[in-house]
Image (cartoon, helix red, strand yellow):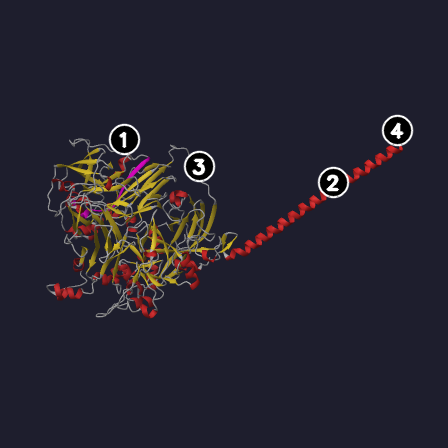
Amino acid sequence: MVFSTKRTPKDQKKDDAVFPGGNYTYTWTIPEDHSPTADDPNCLTWIYHSHIDAPRDIASGLIGPLLTCKKGILTGSSQRRQDVDVDFFLMFSVVDENLSWYLDENIASFCIDPGSVDKEDEEFQESNKMHAINGYVFGNLPELTMCAGDDVSWHLFGMGNEIDVHTAFFHGATLNIRGHRTDVASLFPATFVTADMIPSNPGRWLLSCQVNDHIQAGMGALYEVRPCSRQALPSTLEGRVRKYYIAAKEVQWDYGPSGLEQSSGRRLSEAGSPAEQYFRRSLYRIGGVYWKAKYVEYTDESFREEKQQSEEEKHLGILGPVIKAEVGDTILVTFFNKASWPFSIQPHGVSYGKAWEGMWYHDGLSQNGMSVAPLHNFTYRWTVPRHVGPMASDPPCLTWMYSSAVNPVKDSSSGLVGPLLICQPGTLDDNNKQKGIDREFYLLFSVFDENLSWYLNANIKYYLRMEETSVKKDDGFKESNRMHAINGFMFGNLPGLDMCDGDKVSWHLLGLGSEADVHGAVFQGNTLQMNGMRRDSANLFPHTFATAFMQPDNSGTFEIYCQTSNHYQYGMREQYVVSKCGKRDPAPSRRYTGVRTYYLAAEEVVWDYAPDRSWERERHNHSEESYADVFLSNENGLLGSRYKKAVYREYMDGTFQTPKARKSGDEHLGILGPFLWAEVGEILNVVFKNNASRPYSVHAHGVLEPHAGQPQVANPGDIVTYRWEVPERSGPGPNDSACVPWIYYSAVDTVKDMYSGLIGPLKVCRRGALRSDGTRKDVKREFALLFLVFDENQSWYLEENVEHYSKGNHKEISLMDEKFVESNKMHAINGRLYANLPGLTMYQGERVNWYLLGMGQEIDVHTVHFHAETFIYKNGKSYRADVVDLFPGTFEMVEMLVGNPGTWLLHCHVSDHIHAGMEILFTVLPRAELELEVESVTAGLPYEDEDEFQKIMLFGSKVAQGQIEATVIALAVVGILLLLATSILLGAVIHLERQKRLRRNRRSILDDGFKLMSQKNPGL
């Protein structure tokens, strides 16, 4: 994030590598445009690390924290902060010692028999992946001590690889992160979070990563809150006492009760279907029904009568009852364990003492509520003081979760999880429903791993009629037990997601599970508002939560699904129904102000992911073997960098005879289709011709599509016109910038079509935000970047590519060979690897918008890092950052004022992705001296336009030079017209005056004549 000073090419090489025994002094500056914004915390969290081979250097240990603070925060020679009592710096990372430069030394020093070590052995490699917080595992991190009532600043960051998906959970406390209340922080490689805490609960508390694999591997530490002299936060409780009676009950749970894949009508057990491996029972497959434990609500403390679910609660599925409370309330949960194993209830988002935490760890205490034995009960007491309630930037109700935590991994995998809602005072009515909300839905996205359940052995015995033998070690058996579910249902079997057109709907979304649980929850057909921002998806990870609002205006049956492609394929998709119920007056018909027409064709091309390897060879010349060879070489049965693909290309008109040449500003789009755009209130007509050899289509996120979002299929040679409406709900929300990014792609087979290449960017802007050519009025340049591991193994053209681009006998190539499969996963930015993407050029002082798009599967966790520049991320407020987190279904827009001339790296910071080539370059060119002078004069003024300084004052207003001639001509024409009008008017006046005089003279002559005649004839 630091601002590096400009250096000559010779100087630039001096710090590229400092050799053993050498030294170099780095100079980093923090100008105003790199400092914390007014909305940021007083100090921002960053890092520094060695960058020769960043993944290996960091794995070797060379990394540290860095703070940049607002002026006046650091005072005195000690440079200590004056605004907080204590700072803590924590790195969550699976430190991969296999990548360390010191691996061979460590083997020689610490292995009993170094000569017998196989560095490629999977168990050996796994043993070297240390799930650490600041390099410590299993609670060994020292010195996290504070006083109750202290102002504490936590500086958190992640680092590492694709498995470094972390949810840092602070037991017994809540945090303020960017104005939002939470008790968890999501961390990924090179994600930086500054969290503020005022602890109020004395005791030793667990701080852990809630990802299942990481809990088991020891990613936890203890922090201690001491009751010092300072007064802790007051805990005034003036609300209600809310009582719940909940039991853990064992049930036979059916993930697909209808027996059908609802969208297609196929049987779940049908041979060859994606559902078969999960639902077809056989000698070594359990099928879709498992013994599980479930939280069930009862009417009273006798636990004799279950509380009947209402129709509105049918959708909860495997989830326990919704626990609700308002700020000021006390919650009493009486828990009765009717199951066979010890269980508990541990909540997020409320305040509790150690006696009611619901989890055991080495904190020096032992309480009954930590573990409730079978056929025993316990009453938990949780409170909701103001300091745990929603903040001003939060929605009225915050979504949280409760779960059993005797064994957090096995308990939740067994099914014990439920939603919890904490609301502002006065938000809930007498029926415990949110005021002003017509429908509430709670959705848990989780890959339930039945291999980790307490009931695995019982399921094997009950359904397979065998003892737990070697079947548990079979990989196919293990995979068949990983159920990709929403509320415990798969392939459209979730009931009860029904609403009316125009209803005000709140969606409360939960995540749970392991490293694979990277979810992009997409709502087809309608859009959401989250924190005042327009979206159609929400990202979820283990123990994270989201609240979203929808007012559906599009009736029909639509999918809710996980955008992570393998999750979608394996059944993580359900349906919601919007009906025209007639409850309200019909909404006025939408009025659209304009129509834009695009002509797109699907065309098959030969695409080269890396046409030039010179940068890659220089960048990684320190390695004994090239990281790129597995992806770019076509030796030894591999395909290299060239593949047949299908792409969207734009044409001038409906004849599809003349391709539309890309503008210079669009050169960076690479494999992407044209950058489509619209303003709110317009209609987009996309005329699509399929010039490819198989059926394709065009489907867009965000816009209003007919036919319930199921676009018409275009067969080869067909021309199809798609109509996309852009109502207000497709455009920016109140806290968005002027434009929001969406995406379009072929949806005949959403996974294989996308990996074949058919994908492109779309932006929707506020009315009046765009020029006639579609560019933003308030920025100089716009770039759209798709971060996607193109999996050519899932392309329609795989077999053709094997036939054409492999050397030797292509029939001998095994499509399932592990190295071959890996070689076809192209870690691309707009379809290019290793700095092969052109066109990212801008000038110092320009305002640039970056539209950053994420799609793909579980490995598509991308942390997009801009070297030497920072940007502003807006969500109603403005925040400084230099890394954007992208996941499947994530579309982000950030704003940058570029200020550092040079050619800089832009890359994904995930270790494997760096080595695999997910890196490009962007260039900032310096301005001329005059431009720099003008910029310095106007730097403090509100920004109007990039070329504002070139405008000239004319009649008190600024006018661009190119407009002056037209203005003068227009004024001259107006002057001539006014002169002509004046002349005509003056001529008319003179003519009328002459006529008056003529009539007057005639009357005078007549009068004289009459007088003369009278004198001559006195008798007349």
Say whether residue 928 is visible.
Answer: no
Q: Nearer the viewer, mark 1 or mark 4?
A: 4
* Residue ID for mark 3: 588
* Residue ID for mark 2: 996
Q: Are marks 1 and 4 in contact (CB under 8 Å)?
A: no
Q: Residue furthest top?
A: 1019
Question: Taking 67 as reference, is 699 left or right?
Answer: right
Q: Are marks 2 and 1 in contact (CB under 8 Å)?
A: no
Instruction: Say whether residue 450 is magenta.
Output: yes
Query: What type is the residue that disc 2 sits on?
Result: Lys
Residue nearest the observer in this picture, 615 or 330? 330
Query: What type is the residue that disc 3 sits on?
Result: Pro
Which residues, given as a range, are shown in magenta? 436-456
Say which quarter of the image contains residue 827.
bottom left
Alpha carbon distance from label 4 to label 2: 34 Å
Mark 2 / mark 1, whichever is N-terminal: 1
Q: Are marks 4 and 3 in contact (CB under 8 Å)?
A: no
Residue nearest the observer in this picture, 378 or 995? 995
Q: Nearer the viewer, mark 2 or mark 3?
A: 2
Query: What type is the residue that disc 1 sits on?
Result: Asp
* Residue ID for mark 1: 430
* Residue ID for mark 4: 1019
